[in-house]
Amino acid sequence: DLANLSDRQLLLDLLEGVLMAASGSGSAHVELLRELAEVSDEVGNGAKALSYYAQLLRRQPNDETALDYIRKHIKEHSAQRSVIAELTRAAEAIDDPSIKRELTRQLATIAEQELADLDFAISNWRQLMLLSPDDPEPRQELNRLLRSSERWHDLEALLLSEISRCTE
């Protein structure tokens, strides 16, 4: 109901004020981020919830609730650069290699398809190549993007590294 939504919005505003006033990375800060994410989602602000979950993930890299929310909602809010910036920072903080690869792959796809940001897409595919040296997909995607953007020197470097890798 509308009154409950208004109360939730007031709670969200209050919690955001507390977050701005608080500094630190302790468990209270983590719980505050979790509460902000949940309340933001409840009031229908998925982009803000996604951003808070990404911040939470930076502090708690294996938080399943944050990971699940991000997996389910990343596409809905991918056009918002601030959300993507938070998710990029979260991906850098994640310890689990498979989750890091999954999130980096999603960011690369979003960068190209949603944001039309080839530099960011290329950067993420390069990062994915480092994370998964035996996976052919990042090389194929990087090859495709470098060709389509006519970045011949970068393509040459990629192909030379492939030749070097094959001869080792």
Image: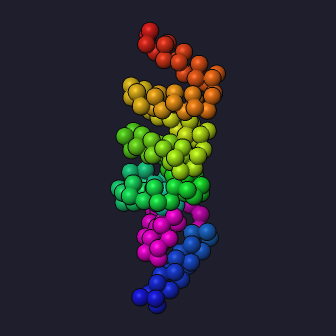
In the image, is 126 to the left or to the right of 133? right
The residue depicted at 41 percent of the width and 88 percent of the height is 1
The residue depicted at 59 percent of the width and 40 percent of the height is 118
Residue at far top of view: 167
Residue 123 versus residue 151 in the image, above or below:
below
Q: Main secondary structure of the magenta part?
A: helix
Question: Is 167 within the magenta?
Answer: no
Q: What stretch is highlighted in magenta?
A: 22-49
x then y, percent, for residue 7? 48, 86
x then y, percent, for residue 77? 50, 60
x then y, percent, for residue 125? 50, 35
The residue depicted at 57 percent of the width and 28 percent of the height is 147
Residue 45 visible in the snapshot: yes
- Image quadrant containing the C terminus: top left
Residue 52 visible in the snapshot: no
Residue 61 versus residue 51 in the image, above or below:
above
The residue depicted at 51 percent of the width and 64 percent of the height is 47
Residue at far bottom of view: 3
Residue 78 versus residue 119 in the image, above or below:
below
Identify the coloring. rainbow
Question: Total marks drawn?
Answer: 0
Question: Is 45 within the magenta?
Answer: yes
